[in-house]
Image (cartoon, grey):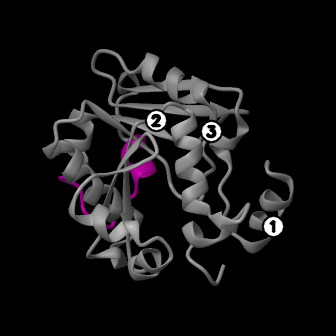
Amino acid sequence: MGTPKGLMRYQGKPWLMHQLELFEATHGHRALIVLGKHHEDYAKAMPWMKTACDATIELGQLHVTVAINEHPEHGQFSSLQCGARILVAEKFSGAYVLPIDVPVPSMEVWSHLRMHMTGDVAACIPESRGRGGHPVLLSHRYLETLLQMPPESRLDVQLQVLPPEKIQRVAVADSNVVLNINTPEQWHKYADEGKP
């Protein structure tokens, strides 16, 4: 794309800021942002990120922390592990995982996933049109398990080896859950139409 995805301009601001605002509108209250090899570019574009690396800050109603993945060459799973270390240490009961290239879905998606996280369920995955997507809700215990995996792994691969009773697939109406904005063409289509 030529620019880190979170810094692409959308409605006059960086995409990451747009995502945070949408998350706040769904009544989200805590966001952990994991940055990799372009973290300096993010800090230049949004200077508050430097402060958020050292302490949780408030952006509107959101409490935001920034973590830097020191080994982004290992891929996205290593960034997930970087965030999981923080969340496990802080004893969160679980966490939603939303890659930057997936638009924030409606509040109903978040609440449906939370309602299905019961008992020994390790992961709740939203589905639209028969396809799994994001955000994925992971239990605290499963976050701990993911920390034991090789950093070059992939979340989808790890989820596939879970016993079926450990996964809840949750049908949702919001098709944003299966949208990945990975190419300039997909970006321009989304930016122009505001939808998949």
Q: Secondary structure at mark 1?
A: helix
Three-letter amino acid code of the residue under disc 1: His
Q: Look at the image and give the residue range highlighted in magenta.
A: 147-160
Cα separation, mark 1 vs mark 2, equals 27 Å
The correct choice, above or below, for 111 with respect to 67 in the image is above
How many residues crowd around disc 3 within 10 Å: few (fewer than 14), some, or many (20 or more)? Answer: many
Q: Residue at x 36, y 62 (%)?
A: 34
Q: Give the image location of residue 139, x and y in percent.
A: 30, 32
Cα separation, mark 3 vs mark 1, equals 19 Å
Which residue is farthest left? 89
Residue 148 counted in the magenta span: yes
How many residues crowd around disc 2 within 10 Å: few (fewer than 14), some, or many (20 or more)? Answer: some
Residue identified by numbered label 1: 188
Q: Give the image location of residue 23, x and y in percent.
A: 53, 41
- Disc 3, disc 1: CB below 8 Å? no
Q: Give the image location of residue 75, x and y in percent.
A: 39, 70
Q: Report whether 17 appears left or right of 29.
A: right
Mark toward the start of the polypeptide (3 vs 1): 3
Q: Residue at x 64, y 65 (%)?
A: 13
Q: Nearer the viewer, mark 1 or mark 2?
A: 2
Q: Residue at x 26, y 50 (%)?
A: 84
Q: Nearer the viewer, residue 142 or 16?
A: 16
Mark toward the start of the polypeptide (1 vs 2): 2
Residue identified by numbered label 2: 28
Q: Give the image location of residue 99, x and y in percent.
A: 50, 55
Q: Report whether 118 appears left or right of 111.
A: left
